[in-house]
Image: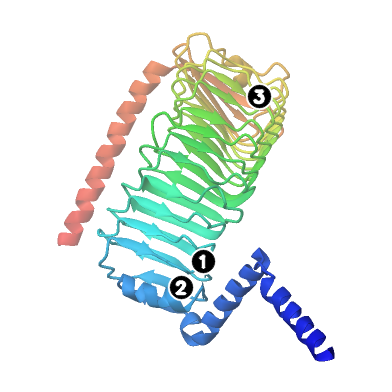
Amino acid sequence: MLKIITALLLAAVATIVHGINIEESGYDREFQANNQDGLKNASNNVLCKKDQHIIENQTDLNVLSNECSTVDGSITFQNYVEPHINLGNIKSINGDFLVEENNLVVSVQGDSLQKIGGTFKLYDLTSLNAVSFPRLHDLNVVHWRVVPILSSVVWDNNIDLIKSLIISDSSLTSLKGFDKIEKLETLNINNNRYLESIDTNIKYISKQLSVSANADDLILQMPQLIWANNLTIRDTKEINLEGLQYVNQSLEFIENKVDTLQLSELKSVGGTLGIIENRHLSKLDFNNLSQISGGLMIANNNAIEKIDFFKSLKLIGGAIQFKGNIRDTDFPSLRLVKGSAVIESSSDELDCSKWVTPNAGSSIIRGGKIECEAKGKKSSASVRQDGTVLDRTTSDSSEEKETNGSTTTGTNLLLLTLAILGTFRLIV
């Protein structure tokens, strides 16, 4: 009887054990996958830790991909003879990823790639039209140059770490996928002829922000930018920098198509502020700006007739240069200009006396020279460092130009004579 009971118990236990279905958890699968990656790298440690991998065809790349999920060194495609680059199972490249001077490569992709620790460089790739890295999130420097038909980039807004982004001469129509990025060293976007929008949440740019020579209708949206080291924007239709507060060096707006510049939060500029040849610009707000440590240049902006958008400006550390159809200037808070002042207006309404003969008796210009030309007359004065105005003169600018022309002709003739004599001496 005891034997029968024992046999029945063993049979029941066996039935229970075989009847249990143990499902493998996601954690277990991930652990096993990572462990396999570790074993893969360990199995060919020398290959994965090489400083440089030269890839000439997809077979070379497959060998690397099959052996290494993490590549410690750099991958360079040299004399690559195939149209597609597929990184396969590679998840991380700690060095550079370089594809240069190739007119055969059509696409570059890596469905598993998550990190490029060095420079991601695409140079002179005239047939490249697509880049796809849907899991890529960790980058250092992106530098793409002369990729003229590149129109498709997939990284699905996963990028959460990047230092510098430089894109030049592509066919991209928009720049996006950087919503998680708040800080950059460099953002340089130029000569992308179809690029119509740049939209980012970047707050700090520590080296350079430069946007130029893109599509005629480019809209630049950077409303959260607070601080930039050096900033130049050209050839842009709309500019949104409404949150900008500090520029450490120069701030330049050149040959844009904008009609409005609203920088009402800007407090200081550490270098020169230049507003140059923005033909449609008529509405400006720099009324919170209190200091420009360099010069202030406002030139050839056809629609700016009155410079009255610096209500809080107290100090200009360099020179002033104004040129255009300027009817009036109004700087109610300005107390000191450390450089000279040169003002040239095509309007008959500008009153130069407020600069050459200040009401307060002493001039805010301390750079030694004031020149103001308007109403066909040119007024000038010398200024001591204490603001005392000396040697005021007024002359007819047309006569002076004629005199200057004669003087210039004489000077050029003298220089030409000296050059001929110098040549003669060399020949002798």
Q: Are marks 3 and 1 in contact (CB under 8 Å)?
A: no
Q: Which quadrant holds residue 295?
A: top right
**Amino acid type, label 1:** Gly
Q: At which x and y percent is residue 222?
A: 59, 36
Q: Are marks 1 and 2 in contact (CB under 8 Å)?
A: yes
As drawn, the label of residue 310 is 3
Identify the residue shown where x is 33% and y is 52%. Answer: 146
Q: At which x and y percent is residue 397?
A: 42, 18
Q: Helix or strand or loop: what does disc 3 sit on?
A: loop
The vertical placement of 245 against 78, above or below, is: above
Q: At which x and y percent is residue 70?
A: 53, 73
Q: Residues within 10 Å of mark 3 (few under 14, many from 20)?
A: many
Of 17 and 173, the residue lying toward us: 17
Work out how far the residue at label 3 is from the one at label 1, CA to CA, in angstroms. 44 Å
Of 17 and 280, the residue lying toward us: 17
Work out how far the residue at label 2 is from the one at label 3, CA to CA, in angstroms. 51 Å
Q: At which x and y percent is residue 409?
A: 28, 32
Extreme residue toward the bottom, this view = 3
Give the residue number, with chain letter if any, for mark 2.
74
Give the residue number, with chain letter if any, for mark 1.
118
In the image: residue 424, left or right of residue 105: left
**Amino acid type, label 3:** Phe
In the image: residue 220, left or right of residue 131: right
